[in-house]
Amino acid sequence: MHEDAKGKTLVEDDLTVSAATLTALERAIGTPSGAGTATLVPWFGATVGGESTAVDGLGLDLSRALLAGIEYEWQRPFAAGETVHVRVTVDDVYRKGANQFGVVVAEFTGADGALVQRQSVTFIERGSA
């Protein structure tokens, strides 16, 4: 893992919340509350720029990597058709014993600049045996 990645911006972009994506998520959830739940997480922030966003940004060795946790802070649901701005950054990189940890944060803001959602994803790269 790149210890100097802390503070690095991995992706910054404007995204449109697709009604089709929300509908597909609703179907996948398959519950009476699926429509509302789908508006809460239309993206996994660590992969907004592509599946390797966090892997490349942190320099993760996938043969030793684990997903350690995901935290969400919601201010409001996403709305179909709205455009949001996302910024994905490496919030922290640190070591505990033989293991390294990397924290990737995605912040989604609305057209008014107000926070819609903040996602914090922690990865562990296990030390070599």
Image (cartoon, rainbow, N blue to C red):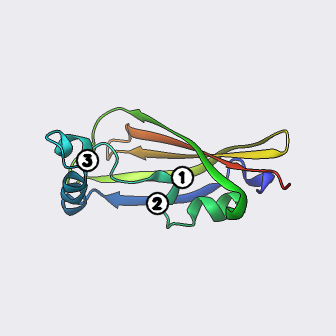
Q: Left or right: 125 with respect to 13?
A: right
The amino acid beneath tag 2 is Val
> Which label sits on residue 72?
none
The amino acid beneath tag 1 is Val
Q: Residue sitting at 63 percent across and 62 percent down?
A: 55
| Foreground of the two, 32 or 93 | 32
Quarter of the figure that contains the N terminus: bottom right
For label 3, the residue is 38
Report whether residue 59 is seen. Answer: no
Q: Residue sitting at 72 percent across and 58 percent down?
A: 64
Residue farthest left in this picture: 32
Judged by depth in the image, the label closer to the viewer, 3 or 2, is 3
Other residues around mark 3 within 10 Å, as few (<14) / some (14–19) / many (≥20): many
Judged by depth in the image, the label closer to the viewer, 3 or 1, is 3
- In the rendering, at what x and y percent does residue 57 appear? 65, 60
Other residues around mark 1 within 10 Å, as few (<14) / some (14–19) / many (≥20): many
For label 2, the residue is 48
- In the rendering, at what x and y percent does residue 26 appear? 20, 51
Q: How many marks?
A: 3
Q: Residue sitting at 51 percent across and 66 percent down?
A: 51
Work out whether mark 3 precedes mark 2 in sequence or the reverse, and give the earlier one. Answer: 3
